[in-house]
Amino acid sequence: MTTPSLRPHQLQILDSWTRTKRPFEPLTPGHVGIYVCGPTVYSDTHLGHAKSYISFDVVVRYFRWLGYRVRYVQNITDVGHLTDNADEGEDKLLKRARLDRVHPMELAETYTRLYFRDMDALGVTRPDISPRATQHVPEQLAIIRQLIQKGHAYEVGGSVYFSVKSWSEYGKLSGRDIEESEEGTRVSVRSDKRDPRDFALWKAAEGGHILRWDTEWGPGFPGWHIECSAMSQKYLGDTFDIHGGGLDNQFPHHECEIAQSHAAGVPFARFWMHNNLITVDGQKMSKSLGNFTSVAKALEKHAPETVRFWVLSTHYRSPANYADDALTAAKGGLDRLLNCYREVHRKAGSEAPGALPDFAVRAERAFVASMDDDFNTPLALGALFDLVRETNAALAGGQLAPPAAAAVTQLMASLGGDVLGVLGPPGVAETSGSVGPLVELLIDLRKELKSRKAFDLSDRVRDGLLAQGIELKDGKEGTVWTKKN
RNA sequence: GGCGCCAUAGCCAAGCGGUUAGGCAGCGGAUUGCAAAUCCGUUAAGCCCGGUUCGACUCCGGGUGGCGCCUCCA
């Protein structure tokens, strides 16, 4: 195993476990193992997922940009997630499958595909491994047996529960005192659990359950939390660098994961990261509140890059309120970025990149410093806009030679593209499709018409092209065109 | 009720014990046959009350308002 060479950086991450911002040092030099809680695939992907997975996508992209070799694991939960409190509820997937009269795996497959389709659209890099809970039942059972053997779990009527009292650290991650939560009002009365706070590792399957596995306790299916403990351990090892997920999973999901894994003797994650939530009118967007906007629906109104830019213009640990004003502002900002990117690339021509101008070196430094500070993407975008302003000024003043312009283009592609994922490769819009030469011909014709003051005809060319989705813009150095989507 | 988070200009959103955050919108200008687009410049802030300090948007205390979690959720 070779250690990759890294760009200079001093990354600090706010760790939810210790509640402090501390320097990141990977377990293995040059390598990062990260696990992020993936979706339970029983309904449409919504914007909440987008915030979470875009945030962690940028985390992974930044690590890779720094030069780390990353293994990014994100589960697909396709069994075991219960519909209501305690552990008396029906499995979410099974319920939906029953209502839709399809096989649970059909349902899981459908929503898994939709999930990836939506994430692809948002430019989210796919995880290196997307393990399914149903495909890792033996691994889950192994941990459950270990927990029983160590006295941290017990079986009742074909179900196995984790004994919260047997693990003194239970409650540390979410900052709660388990003795006090005992008084909680939402605990189900008719449980066969020894303690109402105990959670299910394994559930006995009732008569109609299709998804079931035979065990020494009879047929059943795994509880919600155990799949993440099993799959992270399998693919990242007993201890790994980062475990991430949404704030709403901090308790109970992550609390339970930690209890299970630690009690089984696994050191588990070294850093815990939690992204904040998306709100609508100041209220959390969630499936249960029914106020969610699916990613597909949001993408009907806004370009994927705009959604991505909007998500990244708020820190991952801050809530983001979904509102048209905010998306419109994001689009404006992104357009400014794109315009500069296009112009500087145009200036560069086919010239090879030369030395980076001083202002660009400064901007890159500011960008890295921002990302190093717990992935502060809003601040990093600020650095990018400083680069835009200086680049525009240099361009306008004729101060930017093609080699320097090429270097700036490369930097923008690197920071705005590779790291943040809001910029594509340079020059794609101009060269895409086969209409280029035709448009160029019309532009040339129109220039001739304009010089003869035949403005009615030249306007017809402009309007006609616009109707075809091609916009002409008259600038100082001639007419340029862009394709609108 | 318990635990935690937040309050910044018309809107979105950061850092920082003293020196411009940034974006959108607005305003002024450049450019243009017109338009659009683009570019440059620019206005504007820190919920309330107290305290610490030479100095607070930034630290401390107390209010007020909003949000999240307390076994469905990214």
Image (cartoon, rainbow, N blue to C red):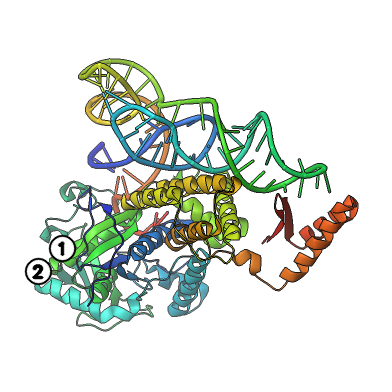
Quadrant of the image containing the N terminus of chain A: bottom left
Quarter of the image where the C terminus of chain A is located:
bottom right
Q: Which residue is mark 1?
A: A163
- Dot 1 and dot 2 residues touching (CB under 8 Å): yes
- Front-lying residue, A68 or A134: A68
Q: Is the residue A204 above or below the residue A38 in the image?
A: below
Residue under the point 50% across and 68% down: A120
Q: Is residue A338 left or right of residue A477?
A: left
The residue at 48%/66% (across/down) is A119
Residue A300, x across and y down, in percent? 61, 59
Q: Mark 1 is on which residue type?
A: Ser
Vertical comparison of A184 with A354: above or below: above
Marking on residue A7 = none
Using the rendered image of the protein, determine whether residue A257 is visible from the camera's viewpoint: yes
Task: State which quadrant residue A51 falls in.
Answer: bottom left
SS of the residue at dot 1? loop
Between residue A375 and residue A460, name the one nearer to us. A460
Q: Secondary structure at mark 2?
A: loop
Q: Which mark is residue A151?
A: 2
- Left or right position of A167 against A420: left
What's under tag 2, amino acid-wise? Answer: Gly
- Ranked by sequence position, the earlier of labels 1 and 2 is 2
Image-based side of B8 in relation to A241, left or right: right
Q: Is residue A349 left or right of residue A96?
A: right
Residue A255, image x and y in percent?
23, 58
